[in-house]
Amino acid sequence: MMKILKMIKTDYRDRIIITELYKHQTTSIEINESKTEAAIRKGVRQDCKLSPLLFNIYIEQAVNECTRIKLTEWEYRC
């Protein structure tokens, strides 16, 4: 995600803030009466105002990459 934000020229300070928001995330998992902490390594934060924007940026890049790959494969077939 940080590579994409850098590629679309997101300001360095904004990237640092986003990194700090998503670094060291944990969640609590409760099974029966046993409770434990688990690290969250992927995904966007729930109820974070930035989450929809970050998701859309990421998906847009993924779609562009898939489209580019399809076009390249089609060009090789012709």
Image: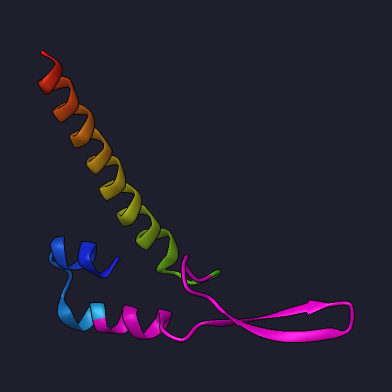
Among the 4 quarters of the image, the one containing residue 20: bottom left
At 16% from the left edge and 68% from the top edge, which residue is drawn?
Answer: 6
What coloring was used for the rendering? rainbow
Does the stretch in magenta take in 27? Answer: yes
Figure check: 20 above or below 76 = below
Does the stretch in magenta take in 41? Answer: yes
Who is closer to the viewer here, 37 or 16?
Answer: 37
At 46% from the left edge and 86% from the top edge, which residue is drawn?
Answer: 24
Picture coordinates of residue 56 (x, y %)?
A: 36, 53
Picture coordinates of residue 38 (x, y %)?
A: 61, 81
Q: Quadrant of the N terminus?
A: bottom left
Among the 4 quarters of the image, the one containing residue 14: bottom left
Farthest residue to the right: give it: 32
Who is closer to the viewer here, 23 or 8?
Answer: 23
Who is closer to the viewer here, 59 or 39?
Answer: 39
Magenta extent: 16-45
At 46% from the left edge and 68% from the top edge, which residue is drawn?
Answer: 42
Q: Is residue 24 left or right of residue 13?
A: right
Q: Is residue 55 left or right of residue 31?
A: left
Among the 4 quarters of the image, the one containing residue 2: bottom left
Figure check: 32 above or below 69 = below
Farthest residue to the top: give it: 78
Q: Quadrant of the C terminus?
A: top left
Q: Is residue 14 left or right of residue 28?
A: left
At 22% from the left edge and 61% from the top edge, which residue is drawn?
Answer: 4
Farthest residue to the front: give it: 77
Picture coordinates of residue 25 (x, y %)?
A: 50, 82
